[in-house]
Amino acid sequence: MYLLNMKKDVQTIVLVLGILGLAAIPRNVMSQNCNCAPNLCCSQHGYCGSTEEYCGFGCKEGPCKTSDVSVASLVTQEFLDGIKSQATGGNCVGKSFYTRDAFLNALGSYSQFGTTGSSDDSKREIAAFFAHVTHETGYLCFVEEEKKTDPYCNPENREFPCVPGKFYYGRGPIQLTGNGNYGAAGRDIKFDGLNSPETVANDPIISFKTALWFWMTNVHSVVNQGFGATIQRINGPVECGGKEPVKVQARIQLYTNYCQKFGVSTGENLSC
């Protein structure tokens, strides 16, 4: 899993808004940081309004449009067992580690996963999530990556500095990787990601929470742009742009299969 860090020049933005006349911008198009009037929705980009653009997919607060799809009704024991049955690894610790109970427990902390937008939006998001999970874990076989020699430590990250002797290689359903991700996930989920990164491979609930955390933090907002956008957010620099076409196609095939199981079209823009 690879995450691009993007920074904004706040001073430039403020200057431009000042020139344009911020006070003249109507409330329904002005960024409110989710501090909208009670009858307005806060969009995924932090703007207030009442149309589908604001209250549909990615809506953060207010009278958001939610689907009638239950995540639990799609992610059944049969669904998970069907994934595990295709694992070919010799030592599939994940078969007993990745339980439905652990997933549903973790899901309780992420109520917007698979519930915003239309029913089709919900089904596509769940299909996309599990397509990546299936690919990253070898059909729910591996709890951590097999190659454990690289510590995946970025010494330039001063906010989440590496702890000597600790390795931040991929662990969990979406292979949490790097001290930056372990530190941020640990802060938000409330576990010591820097000092105890192995928790992600030892605690199934925390493990699923890290996957859902990464998804909701970095991927959820682009699901409606097509499955290809989710590949880009998860492992774009490594796989996209013709670098790993076989792996990209494998993710697409899994997504297509799960969409078929859920009775929904795949949508456009499948590849990155």
Image (cartoon, rainbow, N blue to C red):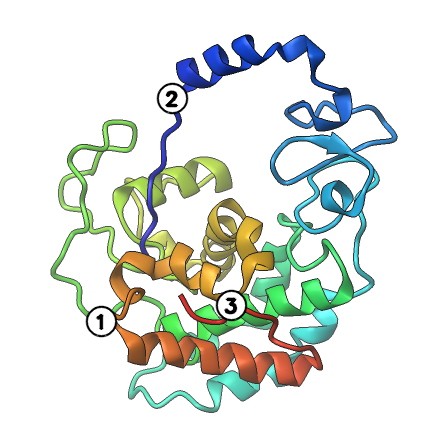
Measured from the top left, where is residue 154 in percent x and y?
A: 18, 41
Foreground mark, 3 or 1, reads: 3
**Secondary element type, mark 3:** loop
Measured from the top left, where is residue 110 in percent x and y?
A: 63, 49
Answer whether residue 123 is visible to the viewer in this image.
Answer: yes
Q: Amino acid at mark 2?
A: Asp
* Residue in the foreground of this view, choosing between 107 and 260: 260
Q: Earlier in the sequence, mark 3 or mark 1?
A: 1
Horizontal side of residue 266 vs 66, given as left or right: left
Q: Measure how far apart labels 1 and 2 are at the Cα level.
A: 39 Å
Measured from the top left, where is residue 225 in percent x and y?
A: 56, 58
**Secondary element type, mark 1:** loop
Foreground mark, 1 or 2, reads: 2
Residue that label 2 marks: 9
Residue that label 1 marks: 146
The quarter of the picture where residue 247 lies is bottom left
Q: Quadrant of the N terminus?
A: bottom left
Measured from the top left, where is residue 140 in percent x and y?
A: 43, 77
